[in-house]
Image: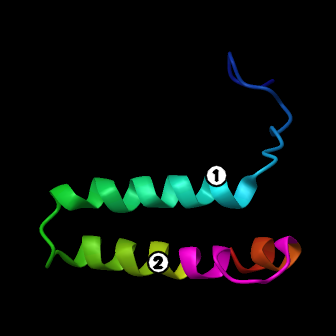
Amino acid sequence: MPAAGYSAWPTLVVQAREHLREKYAAVLDALNIIPSTAEYRLAVEKTVNYKLEILNSDVVDEEVEDKL
C-alpha cells in the first residue's frame, strides 16, 4: 500500500523535458550555497549539466529516458 497522500501509479507529466529542466536548474541554484571548489558541488554540477545537455539535444524522448 502506498504512503498516505501518494498514488500507486506515477503521474504523467506532459511537458517532461521542460519539467526536468526546471528541476535541474533549481538544483544548480541550490548549489550556490556550497563553496565553488567543493568536490561535492563540482560533481553534482557535472552530473546535472550532463543531464541538461541530453535534455537539450534533439534526441527523441525514448532515447532521453534511456540515457537518463
Q: Amino acid at mark 2?
A: Asn
Give me the C-alpha separation between circle 2 and circle 1.
Answer: 15 Å
Q: Amino acid at mark 1?
A: His
Q: Is the N terminus in the top left, top right, bottom left or bottom right quadrant?
A: top right
Residue 45 location (% of width, % of height) = 36, 74
Is-magenta flag for residue 24?
Answer: no
Residue 46 location (% of width, % of height) = 40, 81
Q: Residue at x 61, y 57 (%)?
A: 20
Crowding near the residue tagged with mark 1, few <14, some 14–19, many ≥20 C-alpha atoms within 10 Å? few
* Mark 1 residue element: helix
Q: Is the C terminus in the top left, top right, bottom left or bottom right quadrant?
A: bottom right
Q: Which mark is residue 49?
A: 2
Mark 2 / mark 1, whichever is N-terminal: 1
- Find residue 54 and report its image quarter: bottom right
Q: Residue at x 27, y 60 (%)?
A: 31
Q: How is the image coloured?
A: rainbow
